[in-house]
Image (cartoon, coloured by chain):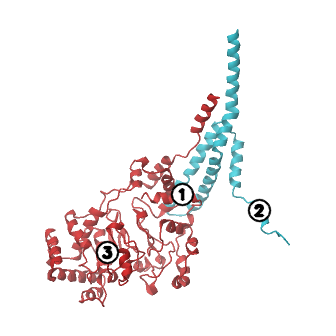
Chain colours: A cyan, B red
Amino acid sequence: MKILNFVFKISVILIAITYLSKEVIIPEFVYQTNKDEYMKLTLDCAFAMDSNWYIEQQTDTNLIKSSEIQLLDCHDYDKLRKYMLSSGISEYSLSGLGLVALEINQKPAEQLAKQHKFRER
Amino acid sequence: MRCFLFFCTVLSFNSFSSDLDFKLSKVIEIYGLQGFSCKSVQNNDVSLSLLGSALFDTKLLSGNRDTSCSTCHLKDLNRIDGLKVSIGVGGDGEGLDRLLDGKGVIVPRNSFTLVGRGHKDYSAYFWDGKVQVEKDRLVSLIGDSKSKGFHSPLSVAAIFPILARDEFLGTFELSDNNDMEIIDNAYYEERYEAASVVIRNRLINSEGEVWDELRLKFANSDINIKTLELSDIGNAIAAFLINKENCINNRWSKYIQGTKNSLTHSEKEGAYVFYGKGRCASCHSGDLLSDFKFHSLGVPQGDVGVSVYGQDLGRSEISLNHLDRFKFKTPSLLSVSKTTPYGHNGVFKDLNEVVLFHINPIIYFKDKEWIQKDYYNYGRVLSSRSTMLSYIDVLTESDFNNLLSFLETL
């Protein structure tokens, strides 16, 4: 009976650890270790697609090839996105990271207004 | 706790890292790269190499007997002279010594290395492409090259300095004969014929040990100096360059051919920038790293140039087409890190400066003093700048530095 009790407890602990790992620890760990790279690749891919739009309007084949190579950044972005999703990170979290990435280069109005204010009168 | 740490370690190994080798395999596939091959050479007669070597080094072919091919293509400097623009006839010494000597005539273009010039796909020579392969036809100022017996485009290019006043012919003041005048007064095919006659007569009639040695080398190569043509000299110099100076085993070629550890991580990142968002391979394409076409970076004119008022109109001096003004041939980047300075007039002192100029020319001018010619002229030059450059997407210091690292591997 003692053994059964021990096995039961161990099983409960293992199940709890597995559950916590799958739902909380792994997603959080993967999120923290990859979020900077994800944001970088989000920007890189957006940039590559943006450039490609204009370059495709050109006829120079070597220029178009260079744009196709640049679009491999989007391949990296897709791979990382799928890896993070399969690790349990939600679509919402990734969308949030994508937004943060796009906002990195935005300047707050306060920063722009600051240089136009009197410092002393 | 141990299990947890082990688990985290496994996960961290599994964290995402971009597969650069995969990306570069796509680069190689899309651009059809094979790596530089020393075996892919232009037609040549290897038995002429020894004679070619002697002709490359001899000053006897120049008007005042003071200049040889090796004056501007020094062996110790990767076959360049290390100067912004070369010093031709009338000078003494080599490289910086020749500049400091101060008596030589300025050749207003930067000397280029000779690596890869004998490759079968090398199709335009000189900054303005005055010798060029066009649809299997060799176009140059001396007319049909096949009937003259030239073996290759390189053998035609090899004789052009001999026909040039600043590079070989000599100055009126220093000349002790009228050889220079005979050649300089003739144009196009007649210039070729005139130079052939002058050099033939010199070889037959000149006395002295050095001439005897040269005559012996011609005899050993089964060339009869009584029927000598300039093409014989071009073929011999080309044979020497193709068999002794053409080959390069650079690390990028090794990588392309399968040695994946021949590049560092930073160099691989740089290669990805070069072929991708850097747009470098839009012009510096193929295994020779040049499209052999003509583009303008808007390079400042500097002090000297081949055109009126000391300007350098570049390709348009050959094509006479207004669209070609201020354009120059895309230089091959083989051995590029070992061939400072850069630009058709050598105004860029190092790789950092010339690469940055592609991206942002304004920084170049920040600390430079404008010479009067550029001060009033540069607007015209700038308007010729290639629109291709507007697509460069290098926006970070790390991309730029990686790009420079990659250039070291070429």
Q: Secondary structure at mark 1?
A: helix
Residue that carries the numbered disc 2 in the rendered image? A111
Q: Label 1 amino acid?
A: Ser
Same chain for the residues under marks 3 and 2 in the image: no
Quadrant in the picture for the C terminus of chain B:
bottom left
Give whichever of B20, B55 is nearer the camera.
B55
Of residues B191 and B398, the one drawn nearer to the viewer in this rendering? B398
Q: CA distance from mark 1 to mark 2?
A: 35 Å
Evaluate whether residue B19 shows in this view: yes
| Disc 3 from disc 2: Cα separation | 60 Å
Looking at the image, which is closer to me, A103 or B148?
A: A103
In the figure, is residue B351 to the left or right of B318? right
Q: Total label count?
A: 3
Q: CA distance from mark 1 to mark 3?
A: 43 Å
Label 2: how many Cα within 10 Å (few below 14, some 14–19, many 20+): few
User: Dots 1 and 2: beta carbons under 8 Å?
Assistant: no
Q: Nearer the viewer, mark 1 or mark 2?
A: 2
* Tag nearer the camera, 3 or 2: 3
Query: Which x, y percent locates residue B116?
Result: 34, 63
Residue B383 position by quadrant: bottom right
Residue B306 placed where, x, y %?
A: 41, 82
Against B313, residue B32 (above or below) is above
Callout 2 secondary element: helix
Left or right of B392? Residue B53 is: left
Which residue in the rendered view is the most extreme toward the top?
Answer: A1
Q: Residue at x 31, y 58 (%)?
A: B40
What residue sits right under mark 3 in the picture?
Answer: B71
State which chain disc 1 sits on: A
- Indicate which disc, 1 or 2, sits on the residue closer to the N terminus: 1
x 57%, y 69%: residue: B360
Asked which quadrant contains residue B75, the reply is: bottom left
Q: Which residue is mark 1?
A: A67
